[in-house]
Amino acid sequence: MEPMKPHQKRFDVIVAGGGHNGLVAACYLAKAGKSVLLLEAEAELGGATASVKPFPDYDARLSRYSYLVSLLPDQIVADLGIQFKTLPRSVASYTPYDRAGREDGLLVAAEWDEPTADSFRRLTGSDREGAAWREFYGGIAALAQRLAPSLLQPLKRAAELKSAMGLPEVWRDLVEIPIGEVIRDRFGDDLVRGVVLTDALIGTFVPPDDLQANRCFLYHLIGNGTGQWRVPQGGMGALVRELQRIATRHGVVIQLRAKVAALDSGPMGVHVETESGESYTAKDLLFAAAPQHLARLRGRAVPESLEGSQLKINMLLSRLPRLKSGVDPRLAFAGTFHVNERFSQLEAAYTAARAGELPQPLPLELYCHTLTDPSILSAELNENGFHTLTLFGLHTPAKLFDADPKRAKALAAERALASLNQYLLDPIESVLAPCRDGSLAIEVKSPLDLEADISLPRGNIFHRDLDFPFLDDAPGVGDRPLWGAETDDPHIYLAGAGARRGGGVSGIAGHNAAMALLTRG
Ligand SMILES: Cc1cc2nc3c(=O)[nH]c(=O)nc-3n(C[C@H](O)[C@H](O)[C@H](O)COP(=O)(O)OP(=O)(O)OC[C@H]3O[C@@H](n4cnc5c(N)ncnc54)[C@H](O)[C@@H]3O)c2cc1C
């Protein structure tokens, strides 16, 4: 396509928001021959998929917000020619525990094996819980394989999709019965129950028996047909760089520091104005930031949603800490390291946070990127045994930070580290890399920071509440295929995480918005 003329103001499509979904949408549209302008509010592309060097003394590029990939379909990677690799983790999870003074841990390998079976046996005293685990996740794996391709197709209705899946019992457990009830029914051990439940609570502030937890759980288990969480080689920013390369190659015009501040839509198309006063017109607008922002820009009621509820801590370590259980830290931190996430602890943390208290102990999970992919550190840091550690704390809703954001963040960080230290022989503070100014290499992001940094409404990592990946509306929508991107304005589409089937690093919302536009009559 033609390069942009110096003052080009009219395009086929404007994409508002340069997170990975906005970039994916822009790439599909430009590849199909549309002239595309992408407007990003911040000075950098990527939104929640950015990589940064947060500690100036160290050459370490950390995934600042999102850090693992499961939901990105191979089809999008192939369609766009994205040269971005994700790497498998050898360990699925490790959960340290102290039972009657005995320090040990539940180690679950990526593929079921004898050490995993033995680990379940040591925790629970029999093979029953391990067998329940395999049966539960076996059923989900079968569903994932069938369900994942549908995410890139027009939406089906619930009954139609359920019948197409042919796994009514798994469907019932994941979609129809509260996941908390399912977990209590299938598993007997509090710790095992908690490990299963965590996938339902990532960034989602609800009790286990709320169906919103089912939605979160479903998306965490079906990614790309396997549900496997993989390490983005080069960090999450590598995906953004690739998408930027492809977008630019196809002629997408990208404007940074160009926050859409006003928009207007009529029969002829849309007109947008940026905060800095630039104005552009296009036939269509794909809005790839949160739907709450779109509602405000259109003067509509802002959709209700849960607020964000997680604490993200990025750390650089001069070495991995030893554990009280004696397990090799290279094994324990290679997968998801669960801390104080028993079912009863997650329930107690929810109750405390609901009552306005910061949970103690704080439930959280960690993983070490550099055990799988050292490429985000300089050769020197690798040679000297440095590692990164990513911490994701649960049940820390935005409202806990409102009154005194700085103090609440300091307290949350203190509780997170104390929670982790319960299981470490070397306190985490003793292995954090020291910086020249006397500080330690640790960066903390509360939900309020996420709103301030990258416009996530109240820090909601999925922009808004997740929906099930099917239509449940009453009949009457018409026969037109729907992609979950449509709004009540025929020229405006949702292309970000807040679209139905958006949420997470998937590109699905970007793909589906582009398809809705390209396939409409
Ligand atoms: C701390 C954290 C950890 C996470 N961990 C994971 C994980 O490990 N794996 C996973 O799959 N998902 C994870 N997620 C969720 C996932 O990152 C997001 O759901 C996803 O990246 C959203 O992508 P997006 O492109 O739709 O939106 P965003 O990444 O939110 O991008 C939207 C962009 O729009 C811009 N913008 C906003 N308003 C305007 C405007 N008015 N005009 C122009 N531009 C605007 C923003 O600056 C931003 O760049 C995590 C999220 C967070 C915050």
Image (cartoon, rainbow, N blue to C red):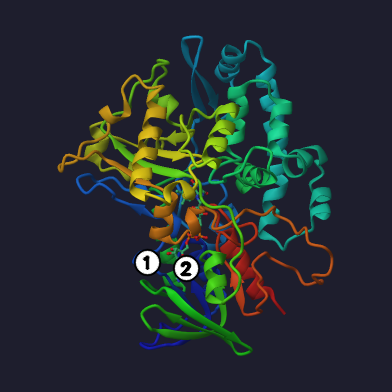
The secondary structure type at the circle numbered 2 is loop
Which image quarter holds the C terminus? Answer: bottom right
Say what amino acid the circle numbered 1 marks.
Answer: Glu
Look at 61% across and 23% down and name the residue there: 190
Instruction: Find residue 343 and report its horizontal and vertical position in percent.
Output: 60, 28
Tell how many labels. Answer: 2
Front-most of residues 390 and 251 = 390
Left or right of 68 in this view: 54: left
Rounded to the nearest angstrom, the CA distance separating label 2 from label 1 is 9 Å
Left or right of 292 in this view: 162: right
The secondary structure type at the circle numbered 1 is loop
Front-most of residues 113 and 20 = 20
Instruction: Find residue 306 and report its horizontal and vertical position in percent.
Output: 58, 53
Say what amino acid the circle numbered 2 marks.
Answer: Gly
Instruction: Find residue 288 and report its horizontal and vertical position in percent.
Output: 52, 67
Crowd class of label 2 (few under 14; some 14 to 19; many from 20; radius 10 Å): many
Q: Is residue 331 above or below residue 516?
A: above
Residue 206 figure quarter: top right
Verify CB contact (< 8 Å) between mark 2 and mark 1: no
Residue 145 seen from this side: yes
Q: Is mark 1 within 8 Å of ligand 1?
A: yes
Q: Earlier in the sequence, mark 2 or mark 1?
A: 2
Front-most of residues 461 and 81 = 461
Q: Is residue 396 above or below residue 279?
A: above
Q: Is residue 95 above or below residue 491?
A: above
The disc placed on residue 119 is: none
Instruction: Find residue 225 and report its horizontal and vertical position in percent.
Output: 65, 45
Q: Is mark 2 within 8 Å of ligand 1?
A: yes
Q: Which residue is mark 1?
A: 42
Residue 451 figure quarter: bottom left
Q: Which residue is mark 2?
A: 17
Look at 40% across and 34% down and name the residue there: 416
